[in-house]
């Protein structure tokens, strides 16, 4: 049973922004419910290989936040949960939640016996479909809660029965049903984050036709030792090592036909990924960055200067017009005009990485409550939103550092609302 009052803060989204907002509010003594639509917390940062500019692994920061979470009784976590409806106003919201069944209860020890027993496999969402996973699975190594989940597509099949029979802890519950919960909430923090822009929509770049054209988020998973290629840079077409790699900036961003805004992280992501090529191949690797302009701000400019000084990295000032494929080699061939000298090029590369931008995870027309948004679907800070506050990439296209800062600010605003609610109720009680 989940109990909440008008002095409870609801945080929607369990990525770095949601975790930050929930923890900051809880550590100030506020009652927090943190919900996440996926089976585990972590969001996009759990899918990164390294952060820029320090090139440290996200697992460290994630582990610290999960330790804080486990040690704080003020936060209640609900995974596989989404907001279905919101009514009411500041300090007095009624929120309807839809909670999908996990088919695995708290007895689970993540031993993996159920995963070994089932046969059905599906594209692995965590790896952007670059490999498959079983119908009974742990989302990723550091998943929290550390419990397996059964894909609903195997329920009522022999695989479900096999998973149940294999579990030594009697953790498989095939009778779990979807739940609908209605809660009283004082303030809401939306931290539903971002999703990568659909590269299939950028037709001239042939992502849907040429296997050796991939996205920056796929490249990031490729470099992870636990990823689909075991940390090696391999061409999807033939599994061969790719040492000559092109990075195309603003793939779908700053474009009237796609995303009009600058996603801010793409330049830094490609600079970071160029260091992966150097890390793996040394002087034998080659990174070519095709760019309109490099947007590296603040202290991050030093990182740009360091990458630019690397002799294995070249910068081509050009908006790539189109990509074709050399049928004999499988190499993508980039076509365009280098504006520094204004000469046309047709450059083959072994692998092309599209620096696709970010857009809000929840589309503007699917947002379950009326709030003020900009033309790109980001939630604006507006008084008419009441006590509904956007955090992280729900508010704007932000890197991890700025997303955490933004989430902390949103938590403080929500805390102020809860404090006013408490003070008002105390005053009413005194008058009575």
Image (cartoon, rainbow, N blue to C red):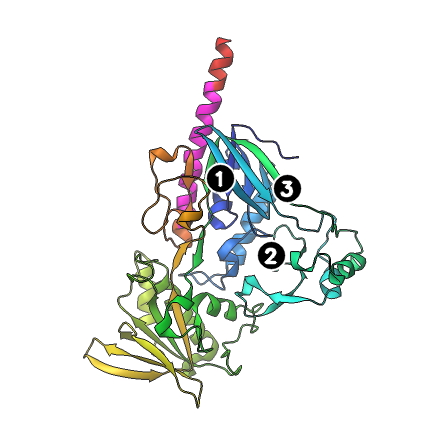
Main SS, magenta region, reads helix
Residue under numbered circle 1: 24
Q: Nearer the viewer, mark 2 or mark 3?
A: 3
Q: Residue at point 35% right, 74% down?
A: 204
Q: CA distance from mark 1 to mark 3?
A: 28 Å
Residue under numbered circle 3: 179
* Lower position in the chain sequence, tag 1 or tag 3: 1
Q: Residue at point 46% right, 81% down?
A: 242
Q: Is residue 43 above or below residue 267?
A: above
Q: Is residue 404 magenta?
A: yes
* Lower position in the chain sequence, tag 2 or tag 3: 2
Q: Secondary structure at mark 3?
A: strand
In the rendered image, residue 286, in percent from the top left (x then y), is placed at 39, 80
Q: Nearer the viewer, residue 160 or 71?
A: 160
In the rendered image, residue 384, in percent from the top left (x then y), is placed at 35, 33
In the rendered image, residue 431, in percent from the top left (x then y), is placed at 48, 9
> Contact (CB < 8 A) between labels 2 and 3?
no
Q: Nearer the viewer, mark 1 or mark 3?
A: 3
Q: Nearer the viewer, residue 322 or 417?
A: 322
Residue under numbered circle 2: 142
Q: CA distance from mark 2 to mark 1?
A: 22 Å
> Contact (CB < 8 A) between labels 2 and 1?
no
Q: Secondary structure at mark 1?
A: helix
Q: Is residue 128 above or below residue 233?
A: above
Q: Nearer the viewer, residue 57 or 233?
A: 233
């Amino acid at each position: 049973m989940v109990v909440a009052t008008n002095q409870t803060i609801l945080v929607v989204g369990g990525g770095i922004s949601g975790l930050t907002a929930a923890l900051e509010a809880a550590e100030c003594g506020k009652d927090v419910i943190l919900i996440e639509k996926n089976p585990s917390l972590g969001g996009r940062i759990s899918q990164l290989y390294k952060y820029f500019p320090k090139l440290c692994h996200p697992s460290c920061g994630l582990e610290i936040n999960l330790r804080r979470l486990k040690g704080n009784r003020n936060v209640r976590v609900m995974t596989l949960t989404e907001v279905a409806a919101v009514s009411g106003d500041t300090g007095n919201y009624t929120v309807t939640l839809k909670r999908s069944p996990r088919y695995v209860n708290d007895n689970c020890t993540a031993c993996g016996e159920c995963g070994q027993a089932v046969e059905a496999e599906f594209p692995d969402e965590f790896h952007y479909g670059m490999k498959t996973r079983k119908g009974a699975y742990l989302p990723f190594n550091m998943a929290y809660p550390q419990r397996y989940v059964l894909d609903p597509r195997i329920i009522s099949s022999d695989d479900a029965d096999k998973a149940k029979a294999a579990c030594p802890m009697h953790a498989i519950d095939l009778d779990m049903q979807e739940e609908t919960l209605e809660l009283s909430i004082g303030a809401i923090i939306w931290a539903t984050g971002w999703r990568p822009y659909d590269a299939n929509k950028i037709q001239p770049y042939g992502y849907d036709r040429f296997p050796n054209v991939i996205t920056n988020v796929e490249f990031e998973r490729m470099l992870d030792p636990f990823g689909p290629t075991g940390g090696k840079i391999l061409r999807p077409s033939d599994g061969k090592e790719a040492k000559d790699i092109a990075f195309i900036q603003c793939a779908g961003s700053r474009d009237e036909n796609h995303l009009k805004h600058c996603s801010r992280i793409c330049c830094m992501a490609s600079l970071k990924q160029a260091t992966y090529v150097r890390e793996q191949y040394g002087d034998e690797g080659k990174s070519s960055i095709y760019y309109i302009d490099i947007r590296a701000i603040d202290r991050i400019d030093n990182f740009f200067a360091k990458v630019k000084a690397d002799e294995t990295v070249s910068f081509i000032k050009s908006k790539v017009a189109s990509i074709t494929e050399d049928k004999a080699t499988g190499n993508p061939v980039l076509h365009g005009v280098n504006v520094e000298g204004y000469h046309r090029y047709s450059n083959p590369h072994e692998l092309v990485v599209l620096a696709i931008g970010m857009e809000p995870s929840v589309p503007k027309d699917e947002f379950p409550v009326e709030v003020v948004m900009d033309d790109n679907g980001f939630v604006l800070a507006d008084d008419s939103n009441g006590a509904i506050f956007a955090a992280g990439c729900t508010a704007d296209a932000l890197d991890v550092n700025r997303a955490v800062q933004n989430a902390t600010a949103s938590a403080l605003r929500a805390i102020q609302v809860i404090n006013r609610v408490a003070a008002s109720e105390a005053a009413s009680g005194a008058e009575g």
